[in-house]
Image: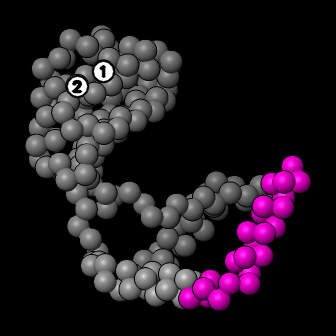
């Protein structure tokens, strides 16, 4: 342990006493500033990331049942689509929402057609009492940059909604 300590002490002392260290630091800062200034950038870059919300209703079903009978088979089908990057699902009482995200740069219309075709070619996966899937295209611009939650024990839900609506209006 003392051998390692001696080595680190000598190494640190070498850097502290060296006249080359300030030059290396200044050169590193210069390179960083140069890289930032020379890297092309856009004020609002056009990033294409196709996303699709798929909504399915199954009135009276519990989330566990929907996950097992609807979401599981649907996710397996969606993962078979070329270009799919992620599949997220959430189940609630009587309904499920699945979000399919495609790779950056995939064509939005082709991605929607691929998902629609895959699901509607295999409608046999839908159990009795379940609605057909509703597909709604999304884009990266639909994803919020900031989400704020208004909570408080001193106010009821109606008051909090009014405060949130006023805050949303003032931010626009």
Q: Are marks 1 and 2 in contact (CB under 8 Å)?
A: yes
Q: Nearer the viewer, residue 64 or 88?
A: 88
Q: What separation in Å lies between label 1 and label 2 (alpha carbons)?
A: 7 Å
How far across and how far down the image is residue 82, in percent?
18, 33
Q: Is residue 16 left or right of residue 165?
A: right
Observer able to see residue 60: no
Q: Which residue is mark 2?
A: 80
* Residue that sits furthest to the right in the current view: 2
Q: Which residue is mark 1?
A: 76
Identify the residue at image location x=48%, y=77%: 171
Image quarter of residue 36: bottom left
- Above or below: residue 91 compared with residue 110: above
- Above or below: residue 49 compared with residue 123: below
Identify the residue at image location x=50%, y=22%: 63
How far across and how far down the image is residue 30, in percent?
46, 87
The secondary structure that most of the magenta stretch takes on is helix
- Name the quadrant of the C terminus: bottom left
How far across and how far down the image is residue 83, in percent?
21, 38
What range is drawn magenta here?
1-23
Identify the residue at image location x=70%, y=77%: 15
Image quarter of residue 72: top left
* SS for dot 2: loop
* SS for dot 1: helix
């Amino acid at each position: 342990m003392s051998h390692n300590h001696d080595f680190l002490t000598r190494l640190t002392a070498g850097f502290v006493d060296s006249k080359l260290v300030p030059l290396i630091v200044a050169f590193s800062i210069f390179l960083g500033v140069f890289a930032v200034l020379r890297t092309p950038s856009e004020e609002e870059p056009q990033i294409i990331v196709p996303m699709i919300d798929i909504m399915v209703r199954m009135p009276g079903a519990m989330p566990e049942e929907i996950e097992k009978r609807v979401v599981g088979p649907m996710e397996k089908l969606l993962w078979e689509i070329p270009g799919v990057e992620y599949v997220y699902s959430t189940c609630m009482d009587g309904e499920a929402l699945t979000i399919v995200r495609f790779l950056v740069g995939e064509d939005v219309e082709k991605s929607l057609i691929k998902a629609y075709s895959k699901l509607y070619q295999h409608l046999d996966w839908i159990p009795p009492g379940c609605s057909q899937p509703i597909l709604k295209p999304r884009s990266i611009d639909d994803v919020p940059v900031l989400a704020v939650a208004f909570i408080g024990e001193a106010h009821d839900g109606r008051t909090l909604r009014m405060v949130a609506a006023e805050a949303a209006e003032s931010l626009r």
